[in-house]
Amino acid sequence: MYVRSPSRRRASTAFHKAHYGARAIAGVGLIIQEATAIEPDGCLTNKDLGIWTDAQGHSMSQMVADLHVLEAQVGIQLGHGGRKSIDAKDPIALVQLLIAQITKSLEK
């Protein structure tokens, strides 16, 4: 298993694809994208990767597909800083957002 913290950008980049791809080629069986924020207000730092926009999700989805071709399994640790986040607002919004996202994904 290999776990790596996010970079400065909020969306995965070519760096992430190369970095995780190298681990998959080396035979790592499980790669976990650590502490991926689910909304901008939930970021603990300015370096957290995010997955709250379609562009971020698409970028990460492409990376995961590439890693699957290399026979690696991929997981994601969803994160929300709650009251400790940079721009903390309403922690209840996290639950509402998660419910909305799960419902949206089930409708597809």
Image: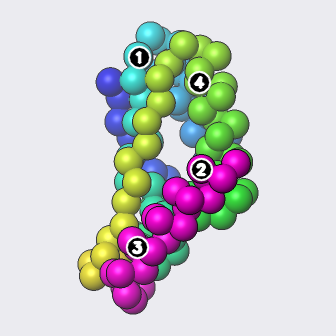
Marks 3 and 4 sit apart, C-alpha to C-alpha, by: 29 Å
Packing grade of label 1 (10 A; few <14, some 14-19, many >=20) is some
Q: Amino acid at mark 2?
A: Leu
Contact? badges 3 and 1 (CB < 8 Å) = no
Marks 1 and 2 sit apart, C-alpha to C-alpha, by: 30 Å
Q: Which residues are magenta?
A: 86-108
Residue position marked by numbered label 3 in the rendering:
94
Between 93 and 68, the residue placed more toward the observer is 93
On the image, which quarter does residue 65 sit in? top right
**Precedes in sequence: disc 2 or disc 4:** 4
Residue position marked by numbered label 1 in the rendering:
28
Residue positioned most to the left? 84
The residue positioned 37% from the left and 60% from the top of the image is 79
Residue 72 in the image: above or below residue 78: above
Q: Amino acid at mark 3?
A: Leu
Residue position marked by numbered label 4 in the rendering:
67
Closer mark to the observer between disc 2 and disc 3: 2
